[in-house]
Amino acid sequence: MPRWLRGIPILGVFLRYLNLYVGRGETKYLVKMAPLDLWLDRFVVPVAIIAGLTSVGGLYLHMTGDLDRLDSHGLVSSVFPSLLGFGIGVFALIFVLPDDLMGALDKRRAKSGLGSSMMISDMAYPLVYLALGIVVSAVLELLISSPVKDFLQLFVFLYGLTLVSDLIGVIAAAALAARFKKTKRHASSDRQKLLSRIRRK
């Protein structure tokens, strides 16, 4: 990713973490552009799907006259701050996760597809998007007064919900990994106790 692009205030931060998210958390993609196939898989296809759903749903609501009553800006401005606060709180918990759990995630990345760096990027990008989405929705509300504004704000909202769903999936995966490690540790301890009893006999 070009340095001048990364240096743009606000947008540069968004693009940097978007590129890291697309690159599955590989730290080299903080400065290097992620491959095209990852862009297609992680960004272009999901955005196209959400855009399609937004177009179909928005067109239906426009034809029935319910698009104005939906108040997409109200949805963004009321829901996103709560989701952002929740996400930041969960993201902060990463720093208190045990090192052995983060190491276990990295060891099992080949099987699960989730490593510690990918977990961080999959949480950081949605948070940056939610913050930027609040600003974009407010700007659209001020500058545009046509059905196009409602379509765009509805897209911002739906794509944000998609990213939050991914974030919850990452949290669940980390919780399952912690549970698996704890269960494995207890099983190993029980096995050692059983072997000790057998040896005494």
Image (cartoon, rainbow, N blue to C red):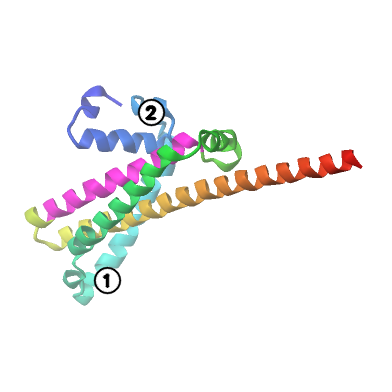
Disc 2 designates what residue?
A: 29
Residue 39 seen from this side: no
Residue 171 seen from this side: yes
At mark 1, the secondary structure is helix
For the residue marked with disc 1, what is the amino acid?
Tyr
Among numbered discs 2 and 1, the one appearing first in the sequence: 2
For the residue marked with disc 2, what is the amino acid?
Tyr
Query: With 45 as the anchor, is 14 left or right in this view?
Result: left
At mark 2, the secondary structure is helix
Query: What residue occupies the far right of the structure in this picture?
Result: 201
Q: How many marks?
A: 2
- Residue 100 location in percent, x, y? 55, 34
* Above or below 169: residue 7: above
The region drawn magenta spans 115-140
Q: Quadrant of residue 162?
A: bottom left
Task: In the rendered structure, find residue 116 and report the number of the disc placed on it.
Answer: none
Disc 1 designates what residue?
A: 60
- Residue 2 location in percent, x, y? 27, 24
Label 2: how many residues lie within 10 Å, few (<14), some (14-19) or many (20+)? Answer: many
Q: Nearer the viewer, residue 26 or 145?
A: 26
Prevalent SS, magenta region: helix
- Residue 21 location in percent, x, y? 38, 38
